[in-house]
Amino acid sequence: MNQNEQNFMKLEMGVRRLAAAYKDIIKEKKTLEEEIEALNKKLSVMQSEALTMKSDNDRLKVASALLGDENHRRLMKTRVNRLIKELDVCISQVKIHKK
């Protein structure tokens, strides 16, 4: 074989390796995209569960305060005061809109 044929064969082998590597990268990319999608779904579920747990925790704190737990009386008082203020604002807005 002459030098040109050897160079051509080396080039052809390099192109084949490059094409195989490209196919492998495409497969890996697809796998990683699927993994990202699965992880995003899992994250959404976990965030939803965390919000639910936080809400449940808040309700339990209020229930404890209602039952007379000393540690949560201040919390209950604050919540009641905040609700009263919100009601006052709503009542004043209703009065304004009736006029």
Image: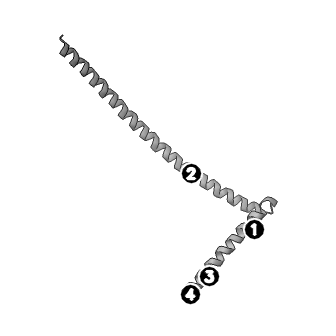
Q: Amino acid at mark 3?
A: Ser
Quadrant containing the N terminus is top left
Sequence-first disc among 4 and 1: 1
Q: Is residue 7 above or below residue 22?
A: above
| Marks 4 and 2 close (CB-CB < 8 Å) | no
Residue that badge 1 annotates: 77
Q: Residue at x 28, y 22 (%)?
A: 14
Q: Residue at x 58, y 82 (%)?
A: 94
| Label 1 CA crowd tier, 10 Å (few <14, some 14–19, many 20+) | some
Q: Amino acid at mark 1?
A: Lys
Residue 90: x and y, percent? 61, 78
Residue that badge 2 annotates: 47
Residue that badge 4 annotates: 98
Sequence-first disc among 4 and 2: 2
Q: Is residue 16 left or right of residue 98?
A: left
Q: Amino acid at mark 4?
A: Lys
Question: Label for residue 92?
Answer: 3
Look at the numbered disc 1 and give the secondary structure of its residue.
Answer: helix
